[in-house]
Amino acid sequence: MRRGLIAASLAALFQLAAPGVQAHDPSQATYLGNEGVLVTHGDTKVLFDAFYADSYGQYTLVPDDIVESMMAGEPPYDGVDAIFVSHVHGDHFTAKPAIRYLRKHPKVRLYGSRQTLDAIAGELESDDPILRRITVVDLRPHDEAKHLHVNDLDIDVVAIPHAGGPSRAGVQNLSWRVTLDDDTTVIHFGDADPNRPDFDRHGEHFKARHLNAAFPPYWFFGNEEGESIMRTYMDADRVIGIHVPAAAIGNGEAWRQRAGGDLFTDPGESRPLSGDTSADKPDTETPATHVPSDD
């Protein structure tokens, strides 16, 4: 799965991200910042890691205009069905902006770990109705995957250890696989560690569905074990790296070339997730170059 890029592939990607194309594609992924992604299939829409407040001096914050559009429920951020949170770190989840959003959008549910609930509960009174709209999945890496079905969403989730070694062992990092309308399936890995045994443990889970898109952190690209995991467990029409440092904004082509695969780099860019995407798949013969992780 060496997803090297050639110039024609990059040109096609940018054409597919153009607003004129977005309007005609029923399923797409739109980048918000860091690991924030909006996935839509028609009127069904979900957000991943969309509400956070800390860049740690190197990662991309969701731009203010996108934040306010989400808060106001303006297209394409109208009619969101669910929010998924991978883990509680300031560059992925902050309680206050999430609470602000949930107050403005009383039909939206939030899905996260016990740590996510604790972060939100710490900002609210114990009888606040927002707490009843939070679905908690309390998993550890050795626990079996959990399945949920809610309205037009099929949801499967496992815990994958956070990258960074033993110092991050206490972080509940959840990998959410969501199918919208029995049609469009995506998977978000949070800050997963590219450690093959952690994925082998859940091999049947990861191989259970073909994916329209997979969103691993960008440090999987150019990393031998990360590349092996992507080849084995990301049977996807698109594999798009996220958590790319803010230095990549405006330099996406160079960063994609260095990574040897597709990356989200600029907030607001998007990729179609339905129809024939083969024309814009990168050349698989170009070897990947490791882009080091700062996380």
Image (cartoon, grey):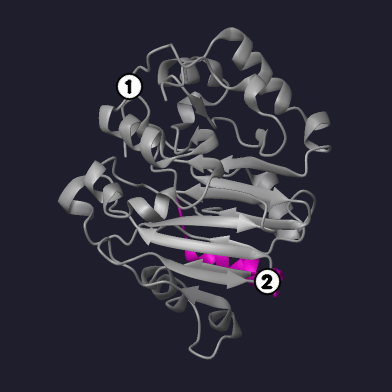
Residue displayed at 80% across by 30% down: 21
The answer to whether residue 186 is left or right of residue 229 is right
Identity, as a three-letter code, of the amino acid under mark 2? Asn
Question: Eyeballing the image, is 150 above or below 232?
Answer: below
| Residue 241 appears in the rendering | yes
Mark 2 and mark 1 lie on one chain; the one further toward the N terminus is 2
* Stretch of the chain drawn in magenta: 91-108
Residue displayed at 42% across by 48% down: 207
The residue where tag 2 is placed is 151
The image's mark for residue 226 is none
Within the magenta stretch, is there residue 94?
yes
Residue nearest the observer in this picture, 246 or 243: 243
Residue nearest the observer in this picture, 237 or 73: 237
SS assignment at label 1: loop
Residue nearest the observer in this picture, 227 or 183: 183
Specify few, some or many for label 2: CA neighbours under 10 Å numbering under 14, 14-19, or 20 or more.
few
**The C terminus appears in which quarter of the rendering?**
top left
Q: Position of residue 147 (x, y in %)?
A: 48, 68
Q: Position of residue 102 (x, y in %)?
A: 63, 70
Residue displayed at 77% across by 44% down: 26
Q: What is the residue that sits farthest to the bottom in this orientation?
A: 127
| Residue 90 appears in the rendering | no
SS assignment at label 2: loop
The image's mark for residue 290 is 1
